[in-house]
Image (cartoon, grey):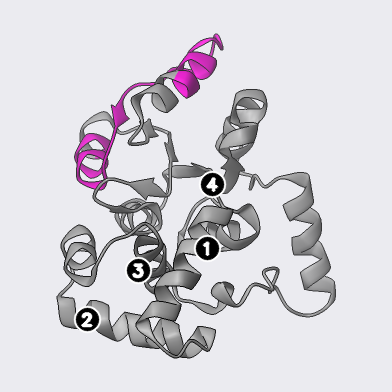
Amino acid sequence: MIVDDHPLVRRGIASVIDGEPDLLVCCEADSIADALQQVRQARPDLLIADLSLGDGNGLELVKRLRAQDAHLKILVCSMHDEQLFAQRALAAGANGYIGKEQATEYVVDAVRHVLGGRTWLSRDMTERALSGVTRGHADFARDPVGSLSDRELEVFELIGRGCGPSQIAEQIHLSVKTVETHREKIKRKLGLRSGVELTRRALQWVTERR
């Protein structure tokens, strides 16, 4: 099953997978709500999910799916920075992370790897992980944005995409007051003094990752 809010991306990944004689894409979804419903109906062996979905963050989808089904294999396929998001995806319950720029070449290998019960990461990310373990920690992301919680990072990204507190609240189903609380925590963690500095920093961060 493929979950991505861009139809062309879904069809591109599906065409690669369907080209394999023993693999088949059983269904597609473009949102968290649609994915949760279709997973119950189609019961796929593996789900490939983006992190940026129309009605929320893919990390939340991974957490909810993992809470519902301990056996479902989940592979995150995203354009987001692997160094920052791969750890978060695995912590949420995913079995692997692949960048969209690598998907055409490696998605079949990643799918087979995860279906085989193993974890998929890029070679570079695997080396970083092993290096972190040998140093006694697993903090691969030196960007202070890496100190944000999953929810704070979601709010931070939406700020960088030009969303105001009310828009953020509506999109991720929180109260405006809760969003404002997250904004204050983000400012404190990143050492920012004002809402203007927060917006500028978030915009810069989002722009650098496009």
The residue at which mark 2 appears reads as: 178
The residue at which mark 1 appears reads as 204
Image: 100 above or below 167: above
Local SS, label 4:
loop
Task: Answer with mark 3 or mark 1, whichever residue precedes in sequence.
Answer: 3
Compare marks 2 and 1 and give the one earlier in the sequence.
Answer: 2
Quadrant of the frame with the N terminus: top left
| Mark toward the viewer: 4 or 2 | 4
Q: Are marks 3 and 1 in contact (CB under 8 Å)?
A: no
- Residue 167, how many percent across, how many down? 19, 62
Q: Which residue is mark 3?
A: 155
| Residue 176 figure quarter | bottom left
Question: What segment carries the magenta color?
Answer: 12-39
Q: Amino acid at mark 3?
A: Val
> Magenta stretch: residue 21 in it?
yes
Give the number of the disc on residue 210.
4
| Mark 3: secondary structure | helix
Tell me residue 197's x, y (percent).
45, 79
Residue 76 on the magenta segment: no
Q: Nearer the viewer, mark 3 or mark 1?
A: 1
Label 3 or label 4, whichever comes before in sequence order? 3
Q: Mark 4 or mark 1: name the one nearer the start of the chain.
A: 1
Q: Earlier in the sequence, mark 3 or mark 2?
A: 3
Q: Nearer the viewer, residue 194 or 42?
A: 194
Q: Pick the residue in front: 54 or 88.
A: 54
Q: Amino acid at mark 2?
A: Thr
